Image (tube, helix red, strand yellow):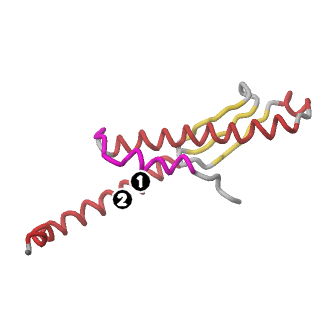
Amino acid sequence: MLKGLSNLANLPGILKQAQEMSGKLQQLNAELKTKKVTGAAGGGLVEVDANGLGEALAVRIDPSLIEKQDRELLEDLLPAAINAAQQKAKDLHAQSMQSLAGGINLPGLGEALGGLSNMQPPTA
């Protein structure tokens, strides 16, 4: 009847591990914020730099695209470049998480990181 209570003796150790992991995750996020990835579209006509958290930092548009005044093409290429940068940031984040886990394939890690594909650009 009280078999489950034996696991409570390990609670302080579990809480300590959770605190350590939380600190490591905060450190990882701070490090990712300093990393830079670049997504491109249209053969490099549009490039977007983002940090490792997927936040857009800069956009470069080839002058020839501006000269053509092709608004539709620009409207298509911008989201594509942003999405490419965010995917690279997601991949960088996943690699960093695996490194943090010591290269161990943790069950559920892929699903937990899957939410990163839905990262939204920061709002100003």
At 37% across and 47% down in the image, what residue appears? Answer: 109
Q: Nearer the viewer, residue 112 or 18?
A: 112
Q: Which residues are magenta?
A: 103-118
Query: In the rendered structure, which amino acid carries the disc numbered 1?
Result: Gln
Q: Quadrant of residue 43?
A: top right
Q: For residue 116: magenta?
A: yes
Secondary structure under badge 1? helix
* Label 1 with label 2: CB-CB less than 8 Å: yes
Label 2 neighbour load within 10 Å: few <14, some 14-19, many 20+:
few
User: Quick check: 58 left or right of 110?
Assistant: right
Q: Residue tagged by mark 2?
A: 23
Q: Quadrant of the C terminus?
A: bottom right
At 81% across and 37% down in the image, what residue appears? Answer: 74
Query: In the rendered structure, which amino acid carries the disc numbered 2?
Result: Gly
Q: Residue tagged by mark 1?
A: 27
What secondary structure do most residues of the magenta stretch adopt?
Answer: helix
Residue 30 pos. (x, y %): 48, 52
User: Quick check: 21 left or right of 92?
Assistant: left
Residue 120's place in the image compared with 68, above or below, is: below
Secondary structure under badge 2? helix
Q: Quadrant of residue 15?
A: bottom left
Label 1 neighbour load within 10 Å: few <14, some 14-19, many 20+:
few
At 18% across and 64% down in the image, what residue appears? Answer: 13
Q: Quadrant of residue 122?
A: bottom right
Residue 55 pos. (x, y %): 61, 49
Q: Nearer the viewer, residue 113 or 100?
A: 113
